[in-house]
Amino acid sequence: MGLLGLLAATLIASVSLGAVTVPVDVVWTAVAGHLGVPGVHSDPISDQIVWTVRVPRALLGALVGAGLAISGVVIQAVVRNPLGDPYLIGIMPGASLGAVSVIVLGASAVGGVGLSGAAFAGAMLAFAVVFLLGRHNGQWPPARLVLAGVAVGYLISSVTFFLQTIATPNQVQRVLFWSLGSVAGASWEDLVTLSVVVLAGSLFLALNGSRLNALSADTELTATLGINVARFQLLLMLVVALVTGSIVAVAGGIGFVGLVIPHIARLLVGADHRRVLIISLLLGAVFLPLADIAARLLRAPAELPIGVITAAVGAPFFLWLLVAGSGRRTRTRVTRQGRSPRAIEPAPPPRWAQGRSARHYTAVLRGQDLPRRRGLRGGER
């Protein structure tokens, strides 16, 4: 409930603050008028600012943050790597190549599609290549998937950088602004499609939280639970690719949200993906509108790309996580005590998932840290 209240307060602040500050009561009057509340009338100028510009922008920021955050959770679980985010599986580099191609070469060079369409197509194409190269013996081993994503990402980035070398100064500026992301161009039309994609993807992932716990622990154990590992991996990453590709097509390449927010969620609620997904969704929906407010106010009336703010906040926090995680691991070795599940790693250590008792399976599905549970025999640890 606390996060829901914080989300509501953030959205109100996002609508109210900007180059022109709109009082909260004026915001409420404009919104209530469009929601059909009787006896409420707002002036045309305030209505234009609030309903046409600020409300879509705040909602788009929340949707983008939520979608990127849950995508990061799933990617980190599938590849079992705490550095997992949409950059790691080629989605962001592919979207960048599509968008930069339109900006530099024109829409006709990519089949006549617009910038958003080219970004989405590029993201999906890069994702398909990464998954084809990452497949081995009918499955997607996490290490192979990461290596394929990194290699394809670098290859695509080299083409993107080449296009920037032949671009005009105006085109380079457009490329830079798109690459760092923005929700300034939000419209109600964008919100309809993106809302459907993000909400449907979030619902699917939330319903599969316990299976995601098993997958992040051990693929062999996942198979013994009756889950088709390869099909489940593919389904998860298809959902993530659709959500992330749709977001990038609308808001550009916003980084660090998918990387950092899942770690914050684990610090708050532990490693159980049924809770991590929900908390990450809410934290992402709060974080990005806050970053957008900062992007608007720091150099008002000019605006900064939102990726500048997310990187400035995300990178120091991630370094802090890295140092704090090392400290926790050192203390654990010295004291020989069980580790807290609220650690930097996205999943409990695989060694405790190698048991074959029903209690182990239950612990895996609940994302619990086995040494912390009571009543376990020594041989099960």
Image (cartoon, rainbow, N blue to C red):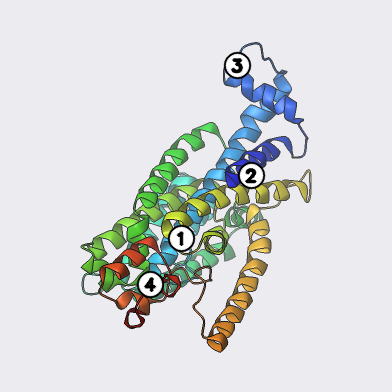
* Dot 3 amino acid type: Val
214 relative to 341 in the view: left or right: left
* Dot 2 amino acid type: Leu
Q: Secondary structure at mark 2?
A: helix
Q: Position of residue 82 (x, y in %)?
A: 49, 70
Density class for disc 1 (Cα within 10 Å; few <14, some 14-19, many ≥20) is many
The residue beneath circle 3 is: 37
Density class for disc 3 (Cα within 10 Å; few <14, some 14-19, many ≥20) is few
Q: Secondary structure at mark 1?
A: helix
At x 27% / y 71%, what residue is drawn?
Answer: 221
Label at residue 375:
4
The residue beneath circle 2 is: 6
Q: Nearer the viewer, residue 352 or 284?
A: 352
Q: Position of residue 325 (x, y in %)?
A: 58, 76
Q: Secondary structure at mark 3?
A: loop
Density class for disc 2 (Cα within 10 Å; few <14, some 14-19, many ≥20) is some
Q: Position of residue 117 (x, y in %)?
A: 44, 46
328 relative to 368 in the view: left or right: right
Name the mark nearer the viewer: 1 or 4.
4
Name the mark nearer the viewer: 3 or 4.
4
